Amino acid sequence: MLAAMVKEAARPTIRWIHVVKVDGALAFRAGKRGKDMIAQWPGLGTLTCARDGSAAKFSPAAGASGRAIGKLQGAQVRGLLRDLTGQLTVHGSAVAVDGRGVLFLGADGAGKSTAAAEMCRRHGAQMFADDAACLEVGEASVSLVPCEGDHWLTHASRLALGLPHPRGAASRDKRDVRASNVGREPCPLALVVFLRFNSAVEAAELRPLRGREAARLLLEAVIRFDLEDGAARGRELEQLTTVYNCAAFFELMRPLRDPGGVASFVSHALRGRNS
Amino acid sequence: MSATAGNWKHGRVRCADSVHARLFDEELVILDLAKGEYFSLDPIGARLWSGLNSGQTVEEVAQGIVAEYDITAEVARADLVALGDELVAQGLLVHDEAAGQRA
């Protein structure tokens, strides 16, 4: 017992550098403990790894559901580890339409997962990501990399898409649906659509985003682990510049009552990119 | 306050070592690694930034803007100086010692 206490006392303390709260409750935090990086999702699990992303270990929290852990590992955990190896990952969903990548960004609840599911289930798109979209950024090219194969949808989203909601699941709970057509190979990114609900608009509106407005939305979407790594953040800004130069950016604002209807706007935006 | 804050209008300035900047079309996004903060500038601000970083004085940048926009030299100079003051105060631009030695 004494030995264990001494060992605990000698352990470096955690310095939290990034804390996210939702409705006042801790939802996520990331920090450093000695030479290790640490990320914690209360009730779900803890990720530890070296500063270069090696020796990664995810420890599930007691009682956490296997499905929720699987989603976390396939999206957020993957994104954090990719950040440590210089790869760009953004919080968003992604699909491919006729070999062209479409990335959906937006705040939580903006309809990113629903948009991807609508594109895949009704319009033959390939699924690439539901929550964390992986990007391969070259000198003058950007590709989407397929990394998730499940849609995670709320009751309302399932209703809009004509899908049954599992019995016993709360209406706000997101439940997984296997995508019918999952991407296998990277494809060039063509379009970035920032989704927003706005009860003040009568009908959906699509408008181009340019310059710093597009840059700000990209910056807000990046999944970062080591916020104090200046070299990584500088590299990230270069990567985002390439993303901006390689894709068309739009904002799609929709009335709250209409969560669907994304496909026609995506088609319109892609046609505009062809002309 | 550094010496740069007072004399930047007459000397040469450059981007601080901890700062990265990238153009998104004509607008500039600036990342200050020291503070972990992002800033952005409109096309005119981006012109000031690139002009100062390429060795122009604020007066020279103002002349270029007056030639292109419907604006008087006085107004252009005052707006650019105000923005330059802010960029220096934020530590994004610093006095270019090397430029002084080269001159």
Image (tube, coloured by chain):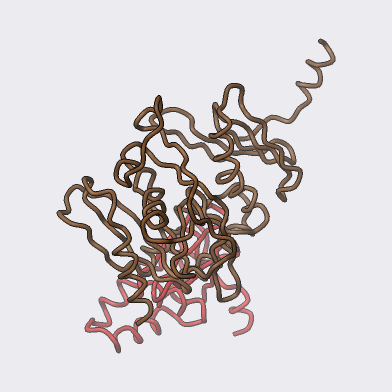
Chain colours: A brown, B red
Q: Is residue A61 visible?
A: yes
What residue sits 35% from the left and 86% below the top? B64
Query: Is B83 situated above or below A119?
Result: below
Quadrant for the C terminus of chain A, please: bottom left
Residue B71 location (% of width, % of height): 23, 81
In the image, A50 versus B54, the foreground residue is A50
Pick the front one: B18 or A118:
A118
Q: Tell me if residue B53 comes above or below residue A104 in the rendering.
A: below
The front one of A216 and A208 is A208
Q: In the visual, does A183 lie left or right of A199?
A: right
Q: Which residue is drawn at 31% across and 58% down?
A: A262
Question: From the image, which quarter does the N terminus of chain A lie in?
Answer: top right
Residue B103 spot, x, y in % from top left: 59, 85
> Percent x, y for residue A215?
42, 63
Residue drawn 63% across the image and 79% down it: B101
Residue A208 locus on image (x, y percent) = 31, 68
Residue B73 shown left or right of residue A138 in the figure: left
Q: Residue furthest bottom?
A: B67
Outermost residue toward the right in this view: A3
Is residue A227 in sight in this rendering? no
Q: Count the marks: how many?
A: 0
Please give left or right for residue B23 compared with residue A62 in the image: left
